[in-house]
Amino acid sequence: MLCALALLSAIAPLSTDMYLPGLPVMSESLGTTTVGVQLTLTTFMAGLGLGQLMIGPLSDGWGRRRLLIIGTLVLVASSALCALAPTVEVLIAARLVQGFSGGIGIVLARAVIADRARGDQAAKLFSIMMIIGGIAPVAAPLLGGALLGPIGWRGIFWVLTALAVAMTVAVLLFVPETLPPEKRHGGGFSAMAGNFGYVLSQRRFVGYAATFALSFGAMFSYISASPFVTQEILGLSPGQFSLVFAVNSVGLVGGNIVNSRLIGRFPTRSLLRAGVTTLFCGGALLLLSILVVGYTPWLILPLMFVCVSSLSFILGNATALAQSQVPKAAGTGSAVIGASQFGLAALVSPLVGLGGEGTAVPMAISILVCGTLALTAFTVLTRESRTEPASEPVH
């Protein structure tokens, strides 16, 4: 079941990293600009956030399994539409639907784990799931770079369609219903609004969720800008970019392995603090190196590796700590985390391209700003308090 949930959670890296090497080619093929093809990333991330925001609370009343099945079936259809899109406008719309349906799998994968585990066990499970799912960001850019020449960017979307079919089969075979009827909340609007009110009233939940979302915003600044920074500025080929991207993904997976082994030996909160601090320092050094030294690959690439690898101590730990604050509304809590995560990613994506293809300064600034705000949210909002509000979700 954990492998199936990891596959569901991998829809974001699979649907972004696989076609990243082809972004410059896509802009020529569809007769659009760099900003136009980056909008396919923006709408996908917006769809991921919207899907999680709507389906997470709904699953607290309806259960997880049948919504997962519906979501994966829509994902199959929307992925096929992306492959057939005749214009960039159709592709942007199809990516929105693809993101929405993919968001269902992501939000419910988190909710299923929250249904089954708490505390350090949940943190370890989230970390292990990210290790399994980490195969996607490692393999996706390499696979995308290798397939781009033989089958083109449309062929890459057909591969994504086949993976969506595999996700559907995995849900049908391996993911049972984890929220029994007696633990479900009412499915009406008032109940959903009450659950959102309950979740958002938990100060420490908001702090951990903000730490997660802002850190992911830093990572997506890198994801969105790196194809152009590495190829247009540093002069790497699409194959070399895929290799660099894969190496950074290996750092993310390796960090998750280390993190999973350290959970239980060190407090989860301490591991999260180390990750956020490293992200902030890496972002500051990256911007400083670009402004002072210039575009030196031997300096920029290692600092990008540090920024990406720091996420392995942030994403799983922040998720577990946030979900532990709202155990009675796991679906709604997961929805808030996911919506803020991908909503911020959708905002960041076009911003890193504002300076054009000849500068990496917007990317570095975005990473540093997100890292600074993540460290601030963690420091200010997640401190222990003896006056936490006593509230309950609406049943």
Image (cartoon, rainbow, N blue to C red):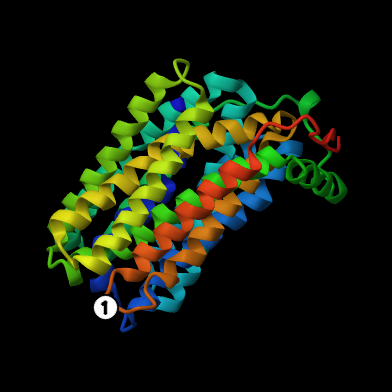
Residue type, mark 1 in image: Ser
Seen in the picture, residue 202 relative to 340 is either above or below; the reply is above
Image location (x, y in percent) of residue 240: 13, 56
Which residue in the rendered view is the most extreme toward the top? Answer: 265
For the point 27% across and 68% down, which residue is it?
A: 291
Question: Quadrant location of the C terminus?
Answer: top right
Q: Is residue 88 left or right of residue 300?
A: right
Q: Is residue 159 left or right of residue 243?
A: right
Seen in the picture, residue 90 relative to 207 is either above or below; the reply is below
User: Foreground residue, 280 or 257?
Assistant: 280
Q: Secondary structure at mark 1?
A: helix
User: Foreground residue, 385 or 147?
Assistant: 385
Q: Is residue 322 left or right of residue 226?
A: right
Quarter residue 139 falls in: top left
Q: Is residue 197 left or right of residue 108?
A: right
Image location (x, y in percent) of residue 230: 20, 63
Q: How many callouts does the rendering have?
A: 1
Q: Residues within 10 Å of mark 1 (few under 14, many from 20)?
A: few
Q: Which residue is mark 1?
A: 29
User: Foreground residue, 187 or 192?
Assistant: 192
